[in-house]
């Protein structure tokens, strides 16, 4: 199952980029044996200042047709890492070819795009900067692949 990060904003060089690159490289290596990956990052940027509505149009263009859509949103479900790994495993086993994680800009995700998502996922009740959400999601993707691989660190 191919994984897509469909995100608002362009990430420049720096510590966030380094972390994301490291975790996604680990995910691609670990996930391959479990039918997960590769990961593609699709960055969009609304240069005309159209807000969430314009960002939603751009995000919809980069989400692959027929993809399972998981939107990152503070109103979403909070889950444990093993539950997240299990959810990815079920999507894969149910025949999903593409899984798109959508991360909005500073104002979040436009309501109709959020409503179209198959799942809303939250990293807690607090609002996180979208660049940090990218780091946390990248780490959780790697962790999910490790869990599915039976990593002893993750056994309960």
Image: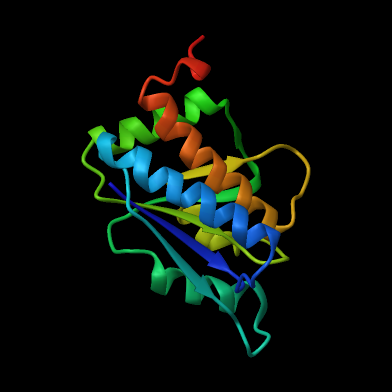
What x and y, as percent, mark residue 75? 66, 43
* Direction from residue 120 to residue 33 in the image, left or right: left
What x and y, as percent, mark residue 92? 28, 38
Residue pictured at 40% horizontal, 34% vertical:
145
Q: Is residue 114 visible?
A: no
What x and y, as percent, mark residue 60? 43, 69
**Front residue of this view, candidates 57 and 43:** 43
Residue 76 is drawn in which quadrant?
A: top right
Residue pictured at 62% horizontal, 72% vertical:
9
Note whether 81 is above or below 155 in the view shown: below
Residue pictured at 54% horizontal, 38% vertical:
140
**Front residue of this view, candidates 147 and 115:** 147
**Front residue of this view, candidates 119 and 37:** 37
Q: Residue furthest left?
A: 95
Please state the total of marks drawn on the protein image: 0
Q: Is residue 90 visible?
A: yes
* Direction from residue 71 to residue 63 in the image, left or right: left
**Front residue of this view, candidates 95 and 31:** 31
Residue 17 is drawn in which quadrant?
A: bottom right
Q: Residue furthest right?
A: 126
Q: Residue furthest top?
A: 156
What x and y, as percent, mark residue 105? 66, 66
Note whether 123 is above or below 113 in the view shown: above
Residue pictured at 38% horizontal, 35% vertical:
88
Q: How is the image coloured?
A: rainbow
């Amino acid at each position: 199952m191919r994984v897509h990060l469909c995100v608002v904003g362009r990430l420049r060089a720096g510590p966030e980029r380094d972390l994301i690159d490291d975790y996604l490289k680990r995910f691609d290596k670990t996930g391959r044996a479990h039918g997960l990956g590769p990961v593609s990052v699709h960055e969009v940027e609304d240069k005309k200042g159209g807000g969430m509505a314009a960002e939603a149009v751009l995000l919809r263009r980069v989400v692959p047709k027929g993809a399972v859509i998981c939107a990152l949103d503070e109103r979403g479900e909070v889950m444990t890492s093993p539950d997240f790994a299990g959810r990815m495993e079920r999507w894969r086993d149910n025949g999903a070819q593409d899984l798109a994680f959508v991360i909005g800009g500073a104002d979040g995700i436009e309501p109709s795009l959020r409503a179209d998502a198959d799942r809303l996922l939250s990293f807690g009740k607090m609002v996180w900067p979208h660049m940090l959400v990218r780091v946390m999601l990248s780490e959780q993707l790697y962790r999910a692949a490790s869990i599915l691989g039976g990593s002893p660190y993750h056994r309960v």
